[in-house]
Amino acid sequence: MNLSETVNTGYFFGLVPLLVFFPIAGMLFNMIFGGKMSEKAIGTVASAASGLTFVVAVLLAYSLSATHGELHQVFLAEWIHIGELQLDWTFRVDTLSVVMMLVVSGVGTLIHIYAIGYMHEDVRFKDDVRRFRRFFVFLNLFIAMMMILVSGDSYLMLFVGWEGVGLCSFLLIGFWYDFNILGQKSTENAEAGKKAFIANRVGDFGFLLAMFTTFWHFGSLQFDAVFESASHHPDPVVISAITLFMLIGVTGKSAQVPLYVWLPDAMAGPTPVSALIHAATMVTAGVYLVVRSAPLYNLVHSTSYIVAMIGAVTALFAATIAVGQYDIKKVLAYSTISQLGFMVAAVGMGAYVAGIFHLATHAFFKALLFLSAGSIILGMERGHHHLAHGHGDHDDADAHHDEEVFDPGDMRNMGNLRKQMPVTFWLYMAGTLALAGIFPFAGFWSKDEILLDAKLHAEHYPGVYWLLAAAAFLTAFYMGRQIWMVFFGKERTEVAKHAQESPPVMTVPLMVLAFLAVFGGALNLPGSHALTHWLEHTIEGVHAGEFDFMVAGVSTVLALIAIGISWLLYGKNPLKAGQIDPLKKPLGFVFTGMENKWFVDEGYGAVIIRPFEKLAKFLSIDLDWNFWHDWFHNEVVYAGFQGLAKFLADPVDMGIINAIADWLAEITKRSSEKLSSLQNGFVRSYALSVLVGVVMILGYLLLK
Amino acid sequence: MNAVPVNYYIILSAILFTIGALGVLIRRNALVIFMSIELMLNAANLALVAFSSANAQLDGQIFVFFIMTVAAAEVAVGLALIVAVFRTKKSIDVDQINVLKG
């Protein structure tokens, strides 16, 4: 890359393509040489690739702050030049994209390191070593795609990354495509991957429509060009259409109502994937897209309100489902949807900095929570392994398959893990307090800023504040419920008694994340507002809000009350083995709804999927096979052709053409038979012919 | 001297030629056919000599000498062939000479 420029100016903007090339290089290295390398070496290469990306991102951040946050565009190569459409591979380095780069590569690197330990055990458990390499190849590809997404200078380049991360998500959700989460043969994970891919297709279609409309109206897909012509000729109808279509894309990728259904199923992927892709980075791409398109959203208030409401409704709706879940990762998945709702609501209200701030802190503490959950699941798995080999027959392979099914992720199987896994416990506590929004953890500051904006703009965005406050209350409640169920009380199974702590390769990255989850709020503390000042170079019209003790006090009190209630329900009288959830009785059918995710999947099944399958069956069996194949092809085309062929063959070919040929042959034969008698071999008769001929010629000459 | 008109010679020549031709066509004896051929040749000679004398030119006379020489040679070859055929077939009937007939 433009190293000379770097040397000349002392800045590192020329290095930006390395953001993509480092992970690609790591991926290729592992693809080519990984077959002969050890697990550790593969993991190190992948982590180093991701780590170098982080270093580049840090250098960019340094250069940007040294040049006062000025936008830098780095041209790499020509891409598409057709008529009006002029698109290049151009990287965009501004304060917004650098924040995303830092979050993605930083959290990504920690998760890479964690995954070395996690996948080692996971792989051994499934007895398949080759997949270790495949996993890291996919992870590196994901980092590369995410970098293209956040650093692209046009909607189309963003879309390349957008689709690339969607692909990686699909590949990694279905990573154990042949086993389910319990280690049995099943295609359930592959189906979860398919579901994610298809739900995202719906959203991507919306995004594509937004791009088509943009190009049709503004004649460009490059960010600055689009925003400039939009501000010069604001056409509310067109801009509303663009932003609403884009919103469909956002609901798909960032798992908002109504397209969020894929994200809980995406927990089928290995836990590092859930942490990296489905909590910290990829799902925030929708939020990034809205912030990036802020100049468009600022022009149409109605669309912004729709965005904010979708976010707020999602935040509350997903939080209610999280309350009724038993799987440790499912709770976190719905929590992620809920928190993404907070971010979308924030960016919808124009509180872009609050949205990005929450995006960053959420990346820290949700990655921490997911990875700790992974640590817990592996701890339970180790306990299970220990028990299975402790007694009973020692014939490994058989014993493994015969033993009864045990779900290591079910919180009803846990209890009192604080004793067995103290490190994980403290890490999990840090994440929980950050997520619940307890002072002074990172989540407190970012969530508070969103609530503050919602409160300030209550007259323009009615209802948003109340939905978000209720969601924040439930957030603290379900996290409290989880903590009491997992770490306190009595062990509800033998396995929980024998759970074992995870090795340092997994816990050390968690400690770094925990540090960030605790102190991440420092990014944008009231008073300094570092992030706000950093982002105002890129996003127009952001302003630092005043810290409001009312809002902060209310949300903190709400969170503490929620944790208190959860203690009363789950902490004071710990759940016993086999006992039903204490919420079930007072809430009745409401809790049944929460447990069953409000039957949304079933509803989609009845309204969309089954009619779709019926339509597909009708199209394939009745229309395609019976009508098209059996009737049209066989009866009309094939039979008609045969009839025509028969007609041409019998009457036409045999009756006319062949008859003519036969007749010619017969004539020739007969005439030759007659003529052959002339050649009788008698010289006299020849001589007679000659004489006759001579007489005739002479006669003619004489009588002429 | 009272010259004989040339028409007479020509008519005689034509009669002789016709007799020769009919002989070739009708007879089966190779010797007779041979003689008929000679008759036709000499009919031609007669016509040549007659025109030569009538036109007072010597070309026809010289032509006749050539024809007589060739005819003599032809007779030598033809008779030799007939003798050879007779030796193998014990016959000189031309209808019997058919071994080359396909």
Image (cartoon, helix red, strand yellow):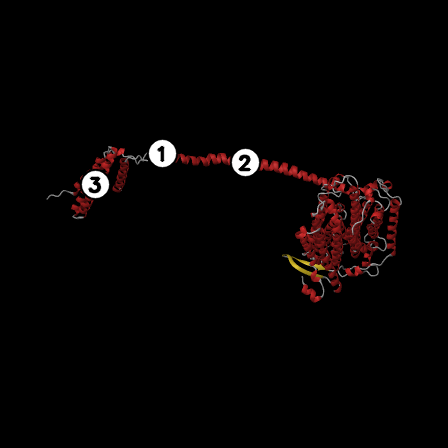
Front label number (1 vs 2): 1
Query: Which of these two is toward me, A328 or B60?
Result: A328
Front label number (3 vs 1): 3
Query: Which of these two is toward me, A658 or A377?
Result: A377
In three-dimensional space, the C-alpha distance between marks 1 and 2, rounded to whole angstroms, equals 42 Å
Q: Residue B95 carries which label?
A: none
Nearer-N-terminus badge (1/2): 2
Question: Position of A87 compared to A121: left or right?
Answer: left
Could you tell me if residue A308 is visible in this image?
no
Please report, as a chain letter, where disc 2 is located: A
Q: What element carries label 2?
A: helix
Q: Which residue type does callout 2 highlight?
A: Gln
Q: What element carries label 1?
A: helix
In three-dimensional space, the C-alpha distance between marks 3 and 1, rounded to whole angstroms, equals 41 Å
Q: Which residue is most to the front?
A: A394
Q: Which residue type does callout 1 highlight?
A: Glu
Q: Residues within 10 Å of mark 3 (few under 14, many from 20)?
A: few
In three-dimensional space, the C-alpha distance between marks 2 and 3, rounded to whole angstroms, equals 79 Å
Identify residue for label 1: A673
Q: Residue A105 in the image: x percent, y percent?
A: 74, 56
Q: Quadrant of the C terminus of chain A?
A: top left
**Which residue is at a point 85% across and 58% down the rendered structure image?**
A547
Q: Is residue A255 above or below residue B26?
A: below
Identify residue for label 2: A642
Question: Position of A32 compared to A639: left or right?
Answer: right
**Which residue is at a point 67% across and 65% down the rendered structure image?**
A4
Please report, as a chain letter, where disc 1 is located: A
Q: Which residue type does callout 3 highlight?
A: Ala
Residues flagged by tags 1 and 2 on a common chain: yes
Identify residue for label 3: B76
Question: Position of A642 compared to A438: left or right?
Answer: left
